[in-house]
Amino acid sequence: MTATVSGNHGLQQAEGLLFDFASLKRTGVDMPAPRGRPDRLGGLGRKVAPPLPGLSEPEAVRHYVRLSQKNYAIDLGLFPLGSCTMKHNPRLNERMARLEGFADLHPLQPMQTVQGALLLMEELSRWLMTLTGMEAVALSPKAGAHGELCGMLAIRAALIARGEGETRKRVLVPESAHGTNPATAAACGFIVDEIHATDDGHVDIEDLKKKLGPDVAGIMLTNPNTCGLFERDIRTIADLIHGAGGYFYCDGANYNAIVGRVRPGDLGVDAMHINLHKTFSTPHGGGGPGAGPTVLSEALAPFAPVPLITLHGENRELIEHSEGTQAFGRMCAFHGQMGMFTRALTYMMSHGSDGLRQVAEDAVLNANYLLARLKLHFSAPFGERPCMHEVLLDDSSIKPKGVETIDMAKALLDEGYHPFTTYFPLVVHGAMLIEPTETEPKRELDRFADVMIALAERVKAGEVEFFKQAPKLTPMRRLDDTRAARQPKLRWRRGENSGAAAKHAAE
C-alpha cells in the first residue's frame, strides 16, 4: 500500500491504541474535589489517579468511529461465513425491542407489572412449538451451546426417571457435528462415541447400527448437517435410536434452511435448540446474552427446566422452583433474554407462516445459485447434488498450484469481503464453507461469485505470490496466525511500543 504522510489511506483514518497517543497526565473533564462531605469509603478511596488516558469528547468519539470503519458488517455487504448465518437484522425488530415496557424491564419486577412480557414469551413459545411440532419449549438458555446443554440435561433427567441414569452413558455423535455437540455431551457426564460419515457427506447408517446397544443414551445430530446437506435417512436414524431406548437430540443451528418447510418433531426429534440469531434474525449475542430456546418432545416435556409460565385465571405467573415437578432444575438466573424474545417474535409475526417458509426457500435458492456458479471453478466435494443453505467447497483443485484455503480467505479481505468459514467442517480437508442467507439479492451474489471466480483464475495463472502476500489493503498486513494463537499478547504494557509494532505490520 502506498505510504502517506498522515498514515491515512483515502478516507480510512489511521488510528493507534488510546494508551499510545493519549496522555495519562491530563483529562478531558476537570472536576474540583468535593468539599465538606464525609468520607463514606472507610479509607478505601484511591490515593492516586487510575492510569487511564485523558481524552476530550471529540477524541474519544473519533477513536471509536475510526475503529468502527475497520470492521466488516452485514450492513456493508454479503457476509459469507458458513454455519454462522450472518443475516440482516430488520430495523422493525430493533424498534419493537426498544418499546417502553420491554426495553426497561427488570427481572425482579412484581408479576402483575409484567403481564405483557409474559404474554409475549407465551406467544413466542407457541410459535416455536408450532413451527417445530414439539410439545414444550425452554426459553431461558442464553445461546446455542447453552440450549444444547438444556436438551441433554433433559435427556439425562428422563433416563434417571426411567432408572437408567447409570447404565445409559454413551452418546453417538456424527463426525460432521458441530464441536459443541461432543463437548456438551461430555459436560453432562456422557461418553462420546463418533459415527463415521459416508463418502457423500451423510451419517453412515451401517456404522450407526453397529454402535447401538443398551448403554446408548441418544444421538446428537445436526440436520441439515454441517456439509450443507439434509440427512435423507433422518427418520430411519430416529427409529433406530428410539428402538434402542435412546433419545434423539437435533442441533438446530441450521434450522434456517428448513423453517416453515419441515417440523423436526415429525422427524422423530426429542430435543432441539434454536439459534434465534440464525433463524429469526436477532443479533448475534445481542450486545450481551443471546438466546437459544430448546424445544422438547412429549417424552421430554415433563423435564423442561424452570421457570415455566402458567395461567391462573387471567393472570400469568412463573413457576420459579422445580420442587413438585420433574424439571431438571434451572439453566440460569431469571427467565432469558427479553430483547431477543421481542425481536424474534416481531420477525415471526411480520413474516407469517408463509413468509417463514419463503425464508428457507430463498436461503436454499441463494446457496444453490452460488454452488452452480462456483463449482465450475473450485472443487465442490458434494456438488453433484443440490445443497441446502450453505455451499461447501475445498482447496483440492487449487492446492497443487500452491494456494490453500487460508490464502483464498486472505485474498478476499482485499476484495472487501469477510472471509468464508475456513477448515470447517473437519470431515472435508481444506474446507471453504459459504452461506449467503436469504437476504442477499442476485446482484450481491453475482458480485461475490465474480470475485471468487477471478481469484480462481489468478490461481490458474500461477500468481502464487499474490495470494501469499495478501492482504495488502487492510489496516494490518498478514499476521503469523500460528504464532498469534500460541503466543498471544493479551495485556498492554506501556513501553512495549505497540504502536510501532502495528505500524510495522501494516507496511
Image (tube, grey):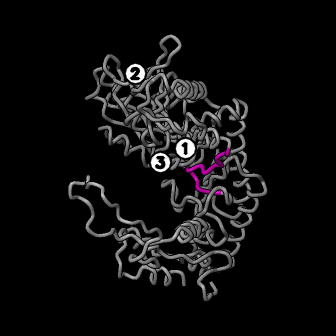
Q: What element carries label 1?
A: loop
For label 3, count other residues whose C-alpha is less than 10 Å away and answer few (under 14), some (14-19) or many (20+): few
Q: Nearer the viewer, residue 267 or 143?
A: 143
- Separation of marks 3 and 1 at Cα, in angstroms: 28 Å
For label 1, count other residues whose C-alpha is less than 10 Å away and answer few (under 14), some (14-19) or many (20+): many
What is the number of the mark on residue 288?
3
- Sequence-wise first label, 3 or 1: 1
Residue 444 forms part of the magenta stretch: no
For label 2, count other residues whose C-alpha is less than 10 Å away and answer few (under 14), some (14-19) or many (20+): some
Residue 268 showing in the rendered view:
no
Q: Nearer the viewer, residue 188 or 110?
A: 110
What is the number of the mark on residue 319?
2
- Separation of marks 2 and 3 at Cα, in angstroms: 25 Å
Say which quarter of the image contains residue 150. top left
Residue 416 placement, left or right of 41: right
Q: What residue type is labelled 2?
A: Ile
416 w.r.t. 299: above or below: below
- Separation of marks 2 and 1 at Cα, in angstroms: 36 Å
Q: Are marks 2 and 3 in contact (CB under 8 Å)?
A: no
> Farthest top residue?
313
Specify the segment rendered in magenta.
79-91
- Sequence-wise first label, 2 or 1: 1
Say which quarter of the image contains residue 345. top right
Front label number (2 vs 1): 2
